[in-house]
Image (spheres, rainbow, N blue to C red):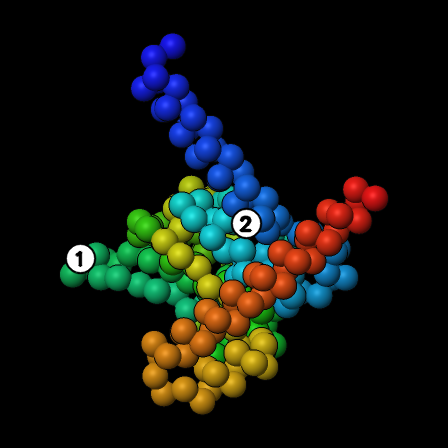
Amino acid sequence: MKTKTKILIMFAIIFVCGRTSAQEDLPYRSFQKFNKDTIRYLDYNFKIRKEQYSNKTVGELLSDLEISVIYISEVLMEQASPSGIDIRGMRLIFRLNGDGRDNNVKDYYISIFLKTVISGVEFVTALSSDKRNTGREYFYYWTPELHKLLKDSKLEYFNTNDRLFEDRLSILENSENEEQSSKELKKIIESEKTRWRKIIQAEKQEVKK
């Protein structure tokens, strides 16, 4: 085997092992492991380890979720033509604690943003499959047809509701500089990642005993 070929194979192995290591660094943890604490479950799996969903589809994200989407709101629309619109993103709500109109800080949700827009006409059709959505203007019931429409769409990025946490809420409420608040929130997330790595490593060591 030529030296160049050996080097290429070696780098390929390192690359694969590196990806496996990164994926195992912060593995998915079940809802049950959080004693059904929805906030902590969402935070760990879909905020702290959100890099795991890089270049994944909406369907792949939803397949990991052990709690059901009930409503959608904050639909992000783009003008496709003088006579039509496209949909770029939306908020997937698991628990609506407010009336759905005041950006309630206690709502449990993930906001998704798509790499490629979906048709506004198809979106309305998918919503209309549930008659309860007739006449609604702000938030709507999630439907199986909407899942079918979105499931193959690649995620641009997504966010959970940082306002569910007191330390993050204070940053978001008190900061007038969006860039600065973003940096402070990132520091908190990195600290959480370090804490979880230690927890998971300790669990692995316990299993080996």
The residue singled out by tag 1 in the image is 81
- Asked whether the viewer can see residue 179, the reply is yes
- Judge by depth and name the residue closer to the eye, 31 or 50: 50
The residue positioned farthest toward the left in the image shown = 82
Residue ID at (33%, 58%): 88
Residue ID at (83%, 44%): 209
At label 2, the amino acid type is Leu
Residue neighbourhood size for the residue with mark 1, other residues' Cα within 10 Å, grouped as few (<14), some (14–19), many (≥20): few
Position in image of residue 53 (x %, y %)? 48, 49
The residue positioned farthest toward the right in the image shown = 209
Q: Is residue 135 left or right of residue 122?
A: right
Label 1, label 2: how many angstroms apart (C-alpha)?
31 Å
Give the structural element (helix, strand or loop) at label 1.
Answer: strand
- Judge by depth and name the residue closer to the eye, 80 or 32: 32
Position in image of residue 157 (x %, y %)? 40, 57
Position in image of residue 188 (x %, y %)? 52, 72
Give the structural element (helix, strand or loop) at label 2.
Answer: helix
The residue singled out by tag 2 in the image is 62
Q: Is residue 125 left or right of residue 105?
A: left
Residue ID at (75%, 48%): 205
